[in-house]
Amino acid sequence: MSTVWIGLAVFLFVLSAVLMVVEIFIPSFGLLTLMALACLGGGIAIFFQISTTAGWIGCGVAVVLIPVVWIVVYKLFPYLPIGRAMLMKRGDKATGQGVPDGVVLKGLLGREGVVWTPLRPVGVCDFDGQRVECVAETGYVPKGRRVKVIHVEGVQVTVRLIETDE
């Protein structure tokens, strides 16, 4: 019978660790933390019912378990799919590059390029392989249209649609 109680105590410890991690993702205003602490306390109480030695071993495991779970989750989180989705990445997703500095952007003045994503009025334009976030001078510009850089201020690049005779 003591193996059943040990199994239950270990289960409560594991459940406690899982609830602590879930608390990060589900806003429960501390309810999940209280449930995790209750599971931890229940597991320790069961260990003490088995024997005093088992109780103190359970306390030691709890003292080690909590920080280890948090460290493991902290280290693994950026590599999990949900972690990659939640954490910000460096650079711009649409271009795969960071924002160019003002000197590089000033060099675009007067250059022509192609609208990479629709400008509503902000989007991405391609200037000979260099993709830059741009602002349309007027309204919406659909993808694939030719534009010309007419103004650069800081990191804001303003483009004008080049009208073509079709």
Image (tube, rainbow, N blue to C red):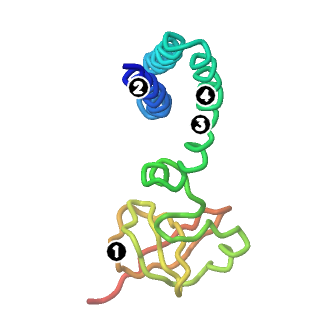
Q: Position of residue 62 (x, y in %)?
A: 59, 25
Q: Which residue is mark 3?
A: 70
User: Mark 3 or mark 1: which is in front?
Assistant: 3
Provide the secondary structure element on which disc 3 rests: helix
Q: Which residue is mark 1?
A: 143
Q: Give the residue drawn at x 61%, y 67%.
A: 98
User: Mark 4 or mark 1: which is in front?
Assistant: 4
> Badge 1: few (under 14), some or many (20 or more) residues near its Cα, within 10 Å?
some
Q: Give the residue drawn at x 41%, y 76%.
A: 115
Which residue sits furthest front?
1
> Badge 3: few (under 14), some or many (20 or more) residues near its Cα, within 10 Å?
some
Front residue of 2/72: it is 2
Of the two numbered discs 4 and 1 on the same chain, state the one appearing first in sequence: 4
- The CA distance from mark 3 to mark 2 is 28 Å
Of the two numbered discs 2 and 1 on the same chain, state the one appearing first in sequence: 2
User: Mark 3 or mark 2: which is in front?
Assistant: 2
Front residue of 151/67: it is 67
- The CA distance from mark 4 to mark 1 is 59 Å
Q: Are marks 4 and 1 in contact (CB under 8 Å)?
A: no
From this view, report whether residue 81 is shown above or below residue 103. Answer: above
Q: Which residue is mark 2?
A: 3
Provide the secondary structure element on which disc 4 rests: helix
- The CA distance from mark 2 to mark 4 is 18 Å
Of the two numbered discs 2 and 4 on the same chain, state the one appearing first in sequence: 2
Mark linked to residue 61: 4
Of the two numbered discs 3 and 4 on the same chain, state the one appearing first in sequence: 4
Provide the secondary structure element on which disc 1 rests: loop
